[in-house]
């Protein structure tokens, strides 16, 4: 049962959206707590982007209700939100600085005020020297950073990010994650859609997983992992581990390169598994863990009939 004391930033109540005869979102209900980082997860074609566009009032739901900070979603609530789409949404032949100031003005910020805020953001994201260049002269990573500034410059209460680290090198991706945590500490609510489960696991307080337009699960990350049980063994080793998949009690092997995750069946003894592994491998790490979000994602989407066609 939903806690009535939760301070809600975004609420969806039985929202449905169809295109032609296909339902992209079906009776979807979500609650995003204010001041949290919330992960909206799902495979391609799950309905994530449609859901985000309805929250932004770009699309109208066929049925159901959407509330933003306690108000019905409409053209006025749109200005309370900063949005960074996965696809680049900037004008390619417009000068970067002029464009960012223009977009802030569209969100109701006076140009002088936006101009006072902008230099610090350009400096932090390494774009100061490029401020008088056209957007199409910037690299893909630079354009991604510029897109973030466009989303944040009007200081929105809610920030919606679709694959925010896409196209970024590891240094820039870490910078982006740091900025998001900084915004959370400042009181912003962040809704994050990403296929990068390590980013989701590091940043998000709560998640929902949807597939084929339907919600499969929702809750705090720690609670979601706890509910899926400690039936996973993390094993790092040297040698040929192909035999692990055939050991009694091993239901699934997930290979992550430098280590594997073994999902165990009911009644399987992890210590027996360790004994068999050490007889044939040089084991450097063995740990019984809660399943990763990656593993939960695969398990729940697979049980729901796999991903929808893109």
Image: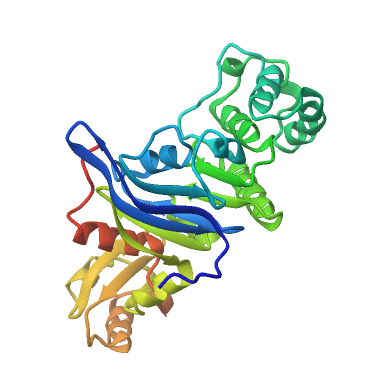
**Based on the displayed image, in which of its 4 quarters is residue 103 positioned?**
top right
Nearest the viewer among 10 and 215 is: 10
Residue at left offset 35%, top offset 40%: 61
Query: How far from the left and from the top, in percent, is residue 178?
Result: 65, 51
Q: Viewed as shown, does residue 3 lie left or right of 252?
A: right
Nearest the viewer among 79 and 253 is: 79
Query: In this rendering, does residue 255 appear at all?
Result: no
Q: In this view, does 153 lie above or below 10?
A: above
Give the colour scheme of this rendering.
Answer: rainbow
Residue at left offset 22%, top offset 88%: 267
Query: How far from the left and from the top, in percent, is residue 66?
Result: 44, 47
Query: How far from the left and from the top, in percent, is residue 259?
Result: 39, 65
Query: How far from the left and from the top, in percent, is residue 159?
Result: 58, 44
Q: For the N terminus, which image quadrant? A: bottom left
Residue at left offset 50%, top offset 56%: 38
Nearest the viewer among 22 and 39 is: 22
Nearest the viewer among 260 and 112 is: 112
**Based on the displayed image, in which of its 4 quarters is residue 219 positioned?**
bottom left
Q: For the C terminus, which image quadrant? A: top left
Q: Is residue 205 above or below residue 91?
A: below
Residue at left offset 46%, top offset 59%: 31
Query: In this rendering, does residue 48 appear at all?
Result: yes
**Based on the displayed image, in which of its 4 quarters is residue 82 positioned?**
top right
Q: Viewed as shown, does residue 153 lie left or right of 250?
A: right
Q: How many labels does the image show?
A: 0
């Amino acid at each position: 049962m939903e806690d009535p004391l939760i301070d809600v930033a975004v609420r969806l109540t039985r929202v449905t959206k169809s295109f032609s005869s296909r339902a992209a979102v079906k009776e979807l209900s979500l609650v995003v707590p204010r001041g949290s980082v919330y992960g909206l997860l799902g495979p391609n074609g799950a309905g994530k982007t449609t859901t985000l566009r309805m929250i932004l009032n770009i699309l109208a739901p066929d049925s159901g209700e959407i509330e933003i900070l306690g108000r019905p979603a409409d053209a006025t609530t749109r200005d309370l939100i900063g949005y960074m789409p996965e696809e680049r949404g900037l004008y390619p032949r417009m000068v970067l600085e002029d464009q960012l100031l223009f977009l802030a003005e569209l969100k109701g910020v006076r140009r002088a005020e936006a101009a006072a805020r902008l230099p610090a953001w350009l400096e932090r994201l390494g774009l100061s020297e490029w401020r008088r260049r056209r957007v199409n002269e910037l690299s893909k990573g630079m354009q991604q950073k510029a897109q973030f500034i466009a989303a944040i410059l009007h200081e929105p209460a809610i920030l919606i990010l679709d694959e925010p680290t896409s196209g970024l090198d590891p240094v820039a991706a870490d910078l982006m994650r740091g900025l998001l945590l900084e915004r959370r500490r400042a009181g912003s609510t962040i809704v994050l859609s990403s296929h990068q489960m390590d980013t989701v696991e590091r940043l998000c307080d709560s998640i929902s997983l949807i597939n084929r337009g339907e919600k499969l699960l929702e809750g705090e990350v720690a609670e979601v992992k706890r509910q899926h049980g400690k039936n996973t063994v993390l094993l790092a080793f040297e040698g040929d581990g192909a035999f692990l998949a055939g050991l009694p009690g091993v239901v699934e092997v997930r290979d992550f390169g430098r280590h594997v995750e073994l999902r165990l069946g009911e009644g399987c003894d992890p210590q027996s598994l360790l004994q068999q592994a050490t007889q044939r491998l040089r084991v450097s790490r063995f740990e019984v863990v809660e399943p990763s979000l990656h593993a939960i994602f695969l398990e729940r989407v697979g049980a729901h009939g796999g991903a929808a066609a893109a």
